[in-house]
Image (cartoon, grey):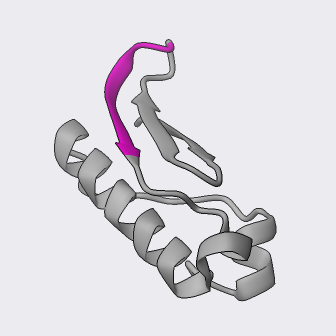
Amino acid sequence: MYYLGIDGGGTKTALVACTAEGREVASALCGPLNYNFIGLNAALANLENSIKLLRERAQIRSLFTGKHYFTSKYRIFR
């Protein structure tokens, strides 16, 4: 199992997949996630593309995300 960290901002998104011991398995940089500036559809597309890229690099077959403000407010990733 890997842990996924996502830091989405107004200029870029940084992602990292790590083991439980903290060893980095893969990382990726992609477009911004701030939907207030780029719109919801663009933010969701950037999030989807960045996760796909990280999954390919880390060879992750499935992914589970916990709920947070973004997913709760817009009811995505059900």
Q: Main secondary structure of the magenta part?
A: strand
Number of callouts in the render?
A: 0
Q: Quadrant of residue 31?
A: bottom left
Task: Say if the magenta span includes residue 68.
Answer: no
Q: Quadrant of the N terminus?
A: top left
Position of 60 with respect to 63 (left or right) is left
Position of 11 with respect to 66 (left or right) is left
Question: Is residue 62 shown above or below 78?
Answer: above
Q: Position of residue 53 (x, y in %)?
A: 25, 52
Question: Is residue 44 shown above or below 41?
Answer: above
Which residue is at 77% across, 77% downward? Answer: 72
Which residue is at 59% across, 75% downward? Answer: 38
Which residue is at 49% across, 39% downward? Answer: 14
Q: Position of residue 12 (x, y in %)?
A: 51, 47
Task: Say if the magenta span includes residue 23.
Answer: yes
Which residue is at 57% across, 59% downward? Answer: 65
Q: Position of residue 49 (x, y in %)?
A: 33, 65
Q: Nearer the viewer, residue 10 or 60?
A: 10
Position of 78 with respect to 54 (left or right) is right
Question: What residue span does the magenta drawing correspond to?
Answer: 22-29
Question: Is residue 31 shown above or below 7?
Answer: below
Q: Quadrant of the C terminus?
A: bottom right
Q: Position of residue 4 (x, y in %)?
A: 50, 41
Question: Is residue 11 shown above or below 37?
Answer: above
